[in-house]
Amino acid sequence: MFRTHARVATPLGRRVLGQLCKHFAHKIPVEHEEARGRAAFPAGECRLAADDDGLDLTCEAASEDELRRIEGIVGGHLERFLWRTPVAVVWERGA
């Protein structure tokens, strides 16, 4: 398994986690609680955890290409949802 992690500093972590989970649930299986979520993409999964200071994203996939695809989907949506307070999603491999 290939794994990556990103920490996004934002006071809107819980709200954005909810938005991401609700959005992804239209197409893929999603689990969502108040401060945690999990999106099951065909190629792998992304686990989300929010606190008062930000959002943690941990993604896993069977291949490097699949992992890059999940990073692009999750990171792109997050950046669009936070367009009023722009953020940069920086992924760290193997974390």
Image: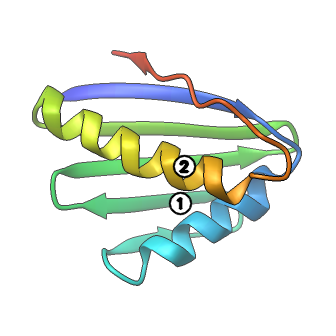
Locate residue 17, reporting x and y percent.
Answer: 65, 59
The residue drawn where x is 61% and y is 37% is 56
Task: Looking at the picture, tell me which residue is in the foreground, 45 or 86.
Answer: 86
Question: In the image, 19: left or right of 83?
Answer: left
Locate residue 87, reporting x and y percent.
Answer: 72, 35
The furthest residue to the bottom = 26
Question: In the image, 2: left or right of 21?
Answer: left
Q: Which mark is residue 37?
A: 1
Image height check: is 66 above or below 20?
above
Q: Which mark is residue 56?
A: none
Q: What colouring method underlies this structural image?
A: rainbow
Image height check: is 29 above or below 50?
below
Tell me if mark 2 has few (under 14), some (14-19) or many (20+) residues whose alpha carbon lies within 10 angstroms of its own. Answer: many
Which quadrant is the C terminus positioned in?
A: top left
Q: Secondary structure at mark 2?
A: strand
Locate residue 12, reporting x and y percent.
Answer: 83, 52
The residue drawn where x is 54% and y is 28% is 6
Task: Looking at the picture, tell me which residue is in the foreground, 34 or 64.
Answer: 64
Residue type at tag 1:
Gly
Q: Which mark is residue 48?
A: 2
Asked if labels 2 and 1 touch by Cβ distance under 8 angstroms, the answer is: yes
Question: In the image, 12: left or right of 39?
Answer: right
The residue drawn where x is 54% and y is 49% is 48
Which quadrant holds residue 11? top right
Which quadrant holds residue 65? top left
Residue type at tag 2:
Leu
Question: In the image, 85: left or right of 3?
Answer: right
Q: Secondary structure at mark 1?
A: strand
**Which sits earlier in the primary sequence, circle 1 or circle 2?**
1
Tell me if mark 1 has few (under 14), some (14-19) or many (20+) residues whose alpha carbon lies within 10 angstroms of its own. Answer: some
